[in-house]
Amino acid sequence: MKQPIEMNINGEPHTTIVDTRTTLLDTLRYKLGFMGPKEGCGNGNCGACTVVLNGSVVNACLVFAVEAAGADVTTVEGVAAEGNLHPVQQAFIEHGGLQCGFCTPGFIMSAKALLERNPNPSEQEIRLAISGNLCRCTGYDKIVRSIQAASQALSQHA
Amino acid sequence: MAEYSVIGTSLAKVDAPERVTGKAVYGADLDLPGMLWAKLVRSPYAHARIKKIDTSKAKALPGVKAVITANDLPHLPKGATAPLVGEVSIDMSAIREIVMASDKARYHGQVVAAVAATDPFIAEEAAGLVEVLPVVEDVLQAMQPGTALVHEDLHTLEEATQEKSDQPSNIATHMVYTRGDVEAGFKEADVLIEKTYTTQMVHQGYLEPQACAARVEPSGKVTLWTSAQGHFTVRTQLVTLLGLPANQLNVIPMEIGGGFGGKALALFEPTAIVLAQKTSRPVKLVVSREEVLRATGPGAPAVITVKAGAKKDGKLTAISTTMRYDAGAFPGSPVSRGLLVGLAPYKLDNMLAEGFDVLTNKPRVQAYRAPGGTPAAFAVESLMDALAEEIGVDPLEFRQKNAAEEGDTLPLGMPLNRIGLTEMLGEIQKHSCWTTPLEGANRGRGLALGYWIGGSFTSSAEIKINPDATASIFVGTVDLTGTRTTILQMVADELQLDPTEITITVGDTDTAPFADLSGGSRITYTMSAAAHQASHDVLSQLRVRAAEKLKVSVDDVEYKQKRFWAKDDTQNEVSLADLARESVAWGSGPIIGKGSTTRMQPAHSYAAHVADVEIDPDTGKATILRYTCFQDVGKAINPMQVEGQIQGGAVQGIGWALNEEYIFDNGELKNASLLDYRCPVALDLPMIETVLTEVPASEGPYGLRGVGEVPIVPPGAALANAIYRATGKRLYELPMNPERVFWAIHGNGPNGTNGSGTNGSGRS
Amino acid sequence: MHAFDYAAPQSLQEAVALLSEANGEARPLAGGTDLVTQMKENRRSLSLVVDIKRISELNVLSYTGSGLHIGAAVSCTKIASFDPASDHYPALAEACALVGSYQIQNRAGLGGNFCNAAPSADAVPPALSYGAALLLEGPNGRRELPAEYLFTGPGQTVLEKGEILVEIILPVPPPNSGAAYLRFIPREEMDIAVAGVGSFVQLSPDKQTCEQARITLAAVAPTPLRAKEAEAFLAGKTLDVTTIAQAGELAAQAASPISDVRGSATYRIELVKVLTRRTLTRALERTRG
């Protein structure tokens, strides 16, 4: 069953026709070309597909595109404003918070959402906030440190 | 030693901006015009003879463009091989069976057919008529005579004599290495301990499921995009498997979402190519997470017996081990690596090391970070801890008394060149993770060692000096771990350029210089030689041109900071900028430096981990309080990346130690999801401290050692030894999940489970 | 995944009509974190999916004189961060923050946790311990059901064709009461409970004895389960260490777990004892404010 849907993605309107079975993730990737969110498991267990849907981070692999009709969606492609990297992205680069990079778009989204609701998280709060994002390369150490550094950078700008 | 300004600094990954913005292109991100989606059809039985595969229903489905079975792959004579790395070759007739089974499905989830369709939702249908056979699941059961045979025509190879057994068997290879007199050594010992240890099948757990895409160009040439760890290695396999000449196949490496050894072989690419050839359309094949776990090739499980004796003064007198590694359905477990890694930290005057490569109805194992090392070290390092305790010697002191040194011979026969094991053990002795007493109930500290031989094989680099005096590096080595950055750092120092004046590209097989696959901690090590050579090739060519300009002999040309001058007349100079600009204007043409290496001595790496744990005695759950990794890295080209490698490897080892395992029921994997295959999450872990020892390796321009593999080796035993000190109970089976620890403490578990069983924790 | 029709009605009546008139199996869709996975894995084949998130009555979250009203489409994140929930029903708020990851909690809700009827659902035991009732609306009208009577088996409920869960109502907790929920998982996050226990205790006005206790077990029976013998045992008793330990033993007797990839039956029974002790102790602490 196909349905037309409209979404606001990274601040710009997009219209497409989707099969009701198509997830938000596959729609973003294969219909609209936003390849930043990744599919690592397809079942909400790894967080590589994390996007912001109407203000909340969600697993895009567990949302049907038709559910997101009329929604505001932010993907990792929409995080760097006008080409300037977000402090979270900058911190991941400088503090080695990524290796293969496949999980990174999801971590950037989770980390940014954390710092928006809690600008000065403790180490345990950071670890809890990213526990829905699996990383197999870093052992999380440098991801946690990157988020700590981003928290400091953001509070200095504030 | 030379002074460096870029080597030894934590330069940010040169490709990081693409990755934090979602712009890096991985295999599944490819979207080619007219592309079809491939889906694989897999055996629902772990052991079954294929009588017939009926593809007619699938072919009749609208949108299905092709359905293939093993009959559609080119014929390959049994035993046909392709070179893998160096002198090691791989049985391509076995790979063909893993790509698509022809006569028999030998594990649950083995591919039996493939479909290409216009839409990922068009379901594949391939009803099979099959005859189900008894399943062989357990490695010890597989070794028993009379057990069902995974391969009816396979006979045991006796490695020493190269003779084959008379009767077919599930033991593919048997090997024995001896030194000194083990029995005499055991007689000499004051204390003798023998134990058997079991580990389960585990998965590499890379976040990116395998992906590839193939397109047949109008000329008939094939373009292949792949997530494999070595695109030249894939090309070599495809040349044999599909009969394509190498120049008719261009393999383009995509960014890779982790491999850890699990993406070395061409298991999906042949299917994509054959479907593209059949349909004349591009075909993309992306496997699901369930397929990744079920059938891409996990890390090998093992049953390992170790016996060792020591004198009261702490000297080891003899050690013997029998290691039985489960290869899955086709030969090739890393058992010989297990023998090597387990015993390599020790002086071995009297030694017996016996290995079995055993077949079962499980997916064929693939490499997983320090292949074979983690089970072996779990066994040997647990036993060494018990032995030290029994004779009343501190576990660190026991290791120091028996540590291997330069000149000692490794278990499989190679002499050790310069190593830093003793220096590293000295670092532990003065570190707070070891000297600070661990207080509190139910807490314990454990120490274990690890070893990895370090890979060699072929690596190459080309460096072009651009007309504006910037430089471009071109390599054929896939970047899994940050090697673009470390190679660039080395070239920056050799050419005395700023890192921002250099770019590095991993090229495809048509354009890049040849390289073996990325793995085995070999890339930064071998590329240090290749990049150094290429840099100095560039500088030699520039010196010749400078000498002509300066009208002095080449030997009299000095270079520093982008300027060449005459040794005796510093005013007589020419800039790199001038030479670069002129190189394409007239004269000798562009400057292209080349470097390569095919065979370097191993750069042995040793590691030691110290773990503090607390056990909840009511549930058996372990919490890691502190975790410190010591490692001799030779020279850290990029300390931040070295630390990242160590932390990542240690955490994979921690996952293996505490929670990760394949749970089978009659050959079928019961936990084929990232929900129930439990990789560590951030909240499971503390910060992972790293202490780098830098004892230069014997070969290579900077003395560096590969660092990626060894951190996964010690965690099993480090945590087992810590859990013992926290609970008073030794565990003999990985993973030491809460239930196993609980029954070890409380006894009377289901099915006699007490932490030392060999068949899971009473699970069904 | 099999093809299906999708509707996102604005009114409850429309949703009930769509679900009751559907050919083949139809399901309401709220957060979808269970349903989408089941459909992807072909464990559930639907002809119609009715998205109920646009129905205003199902998005209610309020605390009134009659208690806490949680619309069936309200996410776990909203419940966990709703002050009256964390002030008066801390065991529920904490459990909502345990359901999967942060991303999952932003989609999954208590309504779905009930209707999916998994024996391991984390937010259900505390709701049952607080004495939750369910407001249901179906083709034959509206009814209220004590929440523990919803379940008939794993994934099975008494909901009739076309019947929708509208809201979950938790009565105002009586004075001198407290509750706690704990689950055991091998990792620190992301796992399905191997076993879970929610405990509620109400003390006498002098706070010396237990007037009433409710103990609800998760993942150790085909449905979430009240340990009634343990509850009856505690009534009138002083909650000391020995009594609490005896309650743990009795609660374990109510459990009838299976062995699966998450743990053996015998281990789960041991965990029930531990978690009952720990949740009763924590609930008792909470009665003291």
Image (tube, grey):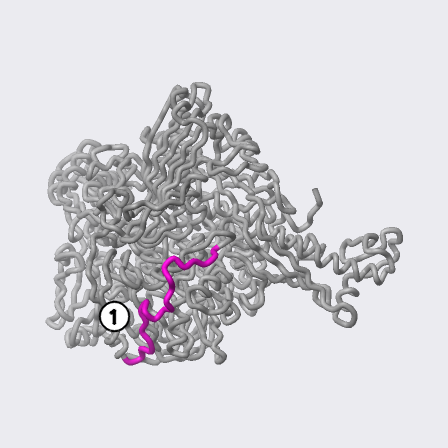
Tell me which chain the residue with mark 1 is part of: B
Q: In this view, does B78 lie above or below B351?
A: below
Instruction: Give coordinates of residue C241: x percent, y percent.
Output: 22, 32
Does any portion of residue C285 appear in the rendered image? no
Q: Quadrant of the N terminus of chain B?
A: top right
Closest to the observer: B558 or B178?
B178
Closest to the observer: C183 or B499?
B499
Does any portion of residue B485 appear in the rendered image? yes
Q: Which residue is drawn at 20% across and 39% down?
A: B750
Neighbour tally class for label 1: few under 14, some 14-19, many 20 plus, Cα within 10 Å: many
Q: In this view, does B277 lie above or below B504?
A: below
For label 1, the residue is B126
Q: Is residue C140 above or below residue A125?
A: below
Instruction: Give coordinates of residue B642: x percent, y percent.
Output: 55, 47
Q: In the figure, residue C186 lies in which quadrant?
A: top left
Q: Does residue C278 appear left or right of residue B550 in this picture?
A: left
Magenta span? B62-84
Does the magenta run of residues contain B80? Answer: yes
Give the mark count: 1
Instruction: Give coordinates of residue C114: x percent, y percent.
Output: 21, 59
Q: Which residue is drawn at 85% across and 54% down?
A: B566
Q: Which residue is drawn at 38% across and 21% down?
A: B187
Q: In the figure, residue C180 lies in which quadrant?
A: top left
Q: Of helix, strand and loop, which one carries label 1?
A: loop
The three-letter amino acid code for the residue at tag 1 is Ala
Instruction: Give coordinates of residue B112: x percent, y percent.
Output: 29, 65
Closest to the observer: C166 or B104?
B104
